Image (tube, helix red, strand yellow):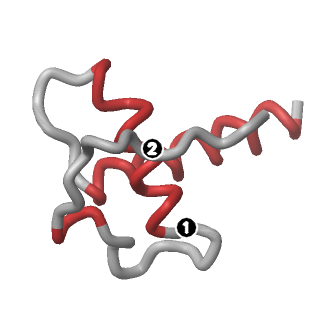
Amino acid sequence: MTAKKPTANRKRRVEDTVPDGAPDWVTEELILETLDTWQPYYGGSLTAEDALEILLGVTKLFEFIHEM
């Protein structure tokens, strides 16, 4: 699967950085891609912390499925 690039018209915001305490595998690019992917499905604006929560939740889901 090819990674999507963040949309060209997306302005970079200060809060689009990797939140403190995030695992080492979480990059700024991954945060931005997560925001671009999930924002259309949410009513309000998502933050970098929201993106991290989504990423960690998906990771836990895949770990659970893998253990089944």
Whole-percent x, y for residue 46 in the image: 22, 42
- Which residue is depicted at the point 17% across and 63% down? 13
63 w.r.t. 42: above or below: below
As helix, strand or loop, the secondary structure at mark 2 comes to helix
The secondary structure type at the circle numbered 1 is loop
Residue type marked 2: Thr
Q: Residue at x 17, y 71 (%)?
A: 14
Instruction: Say which mark, if any, is on residue 26.
Output: 1
Residue found at the far front of this picture: 8
Whether residue 33 is situated above or below residue 29 in the rendered picture: above
Residue drawn at x 45%, y 67% as measured from the top left: 28
**Relative to 18, is 58 on the left or the right?**
right
Image coords of residue 49 (percent x, y): 29, 58
Say above or below: 61 vs 31: above
Q: Which residue is mark 2?
A: 34
Viewer-proximal residue, 52 or 16? 16
Quadrant into which the N terminus falls: top right
Of the image marks 2 and 1, the number of the one nearer the N terminus: 1
Picture residue at 35% right of the left edge, 44% below the top: 8
Q: Quadrant of residue 68?
A: top right
